[in-house]
Image: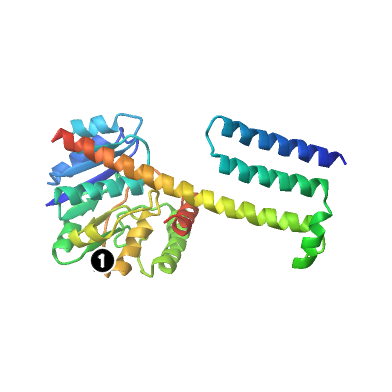
Amino acid sequence: MLIQIILLLFFLFAWSRTFKRYRLKEIKIKELAVWTFFWLMAGLVVVFPNSTSAVAKIVGIGRGSDLVVYVSLALIFYILFRIFYRLEKIEKNITKIIRELALKEEDKKD
Amino acid sequence: MELVVVPAYNEAANIGRVIRDLFQHGWKNVLVVDDGSVDDTAGLAFGAGARVVSHFSNRGQGAALETGNEYARRKGFDVVVHFDGDGQFDAADIKGAVDKIFAGYNLVLGSRFLDDRSKIPGFKKYFILPIARIINYLFTGIKLGDVHNGFRVLDKVALEKIVISQSGMAHNSEIVAGIKKFGLKYCEHPVKVEYFRYGQGLGGGVKIIFDWIFKK
């Protein structure tokens, strides 16, 4: 099916971006391995959609594709949550740095 | 010694008048926290004779106030007055509030409702602020007449205990919450608020609630 080809091409593209970052030494080989595994699994699910049905049955969901959607959504929300708090922490730290700089600058004037 | 902390963001039009007014009322120690203004707020404040610290990037009013508080802690001030830099407040109201600190209160909060000097816009007076009052009580457990007023005076105890981590406008709720958390003795004090600009509307209120819940 066409969607399978589109998705596979997209996964390949996503993986190539990761690989590029590895080549530029922005990420470690471990990270590359995790992402490679992730996109490989995603590719397998796309090529063999029925492969998820077995797992879906075990956990009590009718269709394999539903399982994929549920798990993906849960993952995305978790990641969003993590990013939200990470950003919050960065904001707080920036404020602290700016405060410290402002007070140090004033100290010099005295 | 008392320090008047004036948070200011792009207040070049008002800051000079605010500082002169404070000096005229006998407040010698005025610190303007310039919160990354792109206009000449810092230069004008310095020219008017105030102490000035400048954030090089805008961090929000809560962040600016905490910078002022930290300045006061380091320089050994025992009373800190928070006084908006836009000229909404009347410097004549400070004396009475500071006297209450000397009478033993840890925290004195400005209120627009204790007398009829403030001409509060109707929607704000009868819709936004009553709702804010209920939400404030639910969140902080403290019943206040005026829940979002930038005028306040902190004594040494309040200054040491309350550390503002909310960089935006939710810092106000954070300070009020500090009353219960640290068992501070507080009271409200009548202040006049001049409405030449609207301040925070309904959207601002929603953002405060969001910040209060999700940002700590």
Task: For mark 1, give the secondary structure.
Answer: strand
Q: Residue at x 14, y 51 (%)?
A: B76
**Is residue B196 something that shows in the picture?**
no
Q: Is residue B146 left or right of residue B135?
A: left
Residue B6, above or below B155? above
Q: Which residue is mark 1?
A: B187
Q: Nearer the viewer, residue B214 or A12?
A: A12
Q: How is the image coloured?
A: rainbow
Q: Nearer the viewer, residue B137 or B174?
A: B174
**Is residue A29 something that shows in the picture?**
yes
Q: Is residue B77 left or right of residue B57?
A: left
From the top left corner, tell me how far across and down residue B189 is, in percent. Answer: 25, 61
Q: Residue at x 53, y 52 (%)?
A: A82
From the top left corner, tell me how far across and down residue A78 is, in percent. Answer: 59, 55
Q: Residue at x 22, y 58 (%)?
A: B160
Letter of the chain that mark 1 sits on in the rendering: B
**Quadrant in which residue A95 is drawn:** top left
- Furthest residue to the right? A1
Q: Nearer the viewer, residue B51 or B19?
A: B51
Crowd rating for badge 1 (residues with CA inside 10 Å; few <14, some 14–19, many 20+): some
Q: Is residue B139 left or right of residue A37?
A: left
Q: Is residue B153 left or right of residue B29?
A: right
Amino acid, disc 1: Cys
